[in-house]
Image: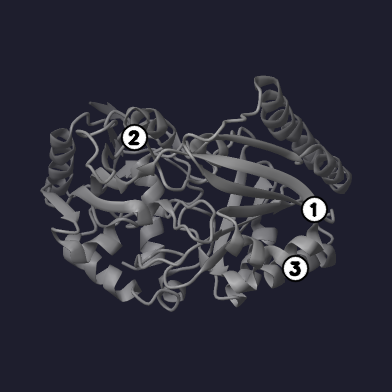
Amino acid sequence: MTATGAIWHNWARTEKVRPLRVERPRTTAALQRAVRAAAGSGIPIKAIGAGHSFTGIAVAPGIQLDLEDLSGLVGEPTADGRVTLLAGTRLHEIPRLLAPFGLAMENLGDIDAQSISGAISTGTHGTGARFSGISAQVRGVVMVTATGDLLEINDGSAAELLPAVVLGLGALGILAQVTVQCVPRFLLQAVERAEPLEEVLDTALERAADADHFEFYWFPHTTTALTKTNTRLPAGSRRKPLNSVSRFVDDTVVANGLYRVTCAAGVVLPPLIPRVNRIADKLMGNRSFTDLSHRVFTTKRTVRFREMEYGIPAEHVPAAVRDIDELIKRKKWQISFPIEVRFAAADDLWLSTAHGRATGYIAVHRYYRERPTAYFAAVEAILRGYGGRPHWGKMHTQDATDLESLYPRFGDFVAARDQLDPRRLFGNPYLERVLGR
């Protein structure tokens, strides 16, 4: 299906574009035809997922490919739990698709709006010092190349390209299918507690190493962190889910509804923010429940915000958080959104923020009606000082010259791009900035 391009916005309203044309392929063959037509006319073409990236990684000034109709399972899972999904499948749809087979994704982030192809292409991750991001769970892809041909990449075919294409920024081709290594369905026992920030920082590395999944949030202007510790349990374990009333009050009324009001009030009267944060600090946390993994990993986010996130060597996380705390105090900034800290295992993907090192992720946010520039720039300087690598889908200012020194395989990725897309059919201004021309 083809349509004249209307103005497209990403979720955070940080990027917009009016594509020359929008196409909505419903089959892999239709996807190939779209790419061949674009190549023949010399018009750039890019796929979009859910538009949940805060950067311009999915901006398509030429032909925009909306893959929403390219969704669902391809065949049945293999005996060892490998599942093939069409590229436009949203993460929140996957648990339902896997349920009849008793399978689950090994790890997830806290937002499930993204498409599977968009999530892996930007390096979406969850938390867990023994677990990697979603891209590292991929065992193969089928990709449409710049010639419109299908290229199958897996451990038995063009395997040398797999560490590049599973986190490829959309720069190497258009993903049509993604094969994910799943695990048997499991439960998570969640324990959420409000604890003194200094105690959390002193023990964060040990707790991340000991727990299956550990993370924490800290509201600036408070001395308390909200910790989240999730323990994996077999599927046959007893479920103790939050009842519908508790979930509605905690996740809808407090975490989204009340927080939206307080953020808006903070824009009008910034001096209110420290007091509001202390109130939010008291209202959130101190609960435990056990449920299916995807119901614990993910949360509902309806308050619009802007985000920057960096991955740094895990051992530097406590010092970096303290530096940010000191920065906010020194600048006397009023910051309403919490700082989020998560952990991930090292992997070998060429452009992964966790490439070759155990990683701690520090994310900072601002309400979408607040200007993030000064805050993000100052925090970015701190995290770059710790060897930080920016999340590809979140706001940052680094370019190819900066990034080349941070990724040992950066040159190999650029060479693969030169091989697969020499005319930059899949390029856009963001990719030109972070990868070069």
Q: How many marks?
A: 3
Q: Which residue has dot 1 on it?
A: 195
Q: Residues within 10 Å of mark 3 (few under 14, many from 20)?
A: few
In this view, the residue in front, 115 or 32, is: 115
Which label lies toward us, 1 or 2? 1
The furthest residue to the top: 245
Give the alpha-carbon distance from disc 1 to disc 2, as whole Å.
38 Å
Q: Of marks 2 and 3, which one's residue comes earlier in the chain? A: 2
In this view, the residue in front, 240 or 144, is: 240
Please provide percent x and percent y for residue 252. Answer: 67, 27
User: Would residue 137 appear left or right of 83 to someone viewing this image?
Assistant: right
What secondary structure is marked by label 2? Answer: loop
Residue found at x 14% / y 40%:
32
User: Would residue 313 appear left or right of 377 to someone viewing this image?
Assistant: left
The amino acid at mark 2 is Thr
Q: In the rendered image, which quarter contains the N terminus?
A: top left
Residue found at x 51% / y 51%:
126
In this rendering, the answer to whether 326 lies above or below 185 is: below
Specify the quadrant of the image occupied by residue 304: top right
Please provide percent x and percent y for residue 66. Answer: 31, 34
Q: Of marks 1 and 3, which one's residue comes earlier in the chain? A: 1
In this view, the residue in front, 407 or 224, is: 224
Please provide percent x and percent y for residue 68. Answer: 33, 31
Which disc is residue 89 wearing? 2
Which disc is residue 202 wearing? 3
Specify the quadrant of the image occupied by residue 100: top left
Give the alpha-carbon distance from disc 1 to disc 3, as whole Å.
12 Å
In this view, the residue in front, 412 or 4, is: 412
Q: In the rendered image, which quarter contains the C terminus?
A: bottom left
Q: Of marks 1 and 2, which one's residue comes earlier in the chain? A: 2
Q: Residues within 10 Å of mark 2 (few under 14, many from 20)?
A: many
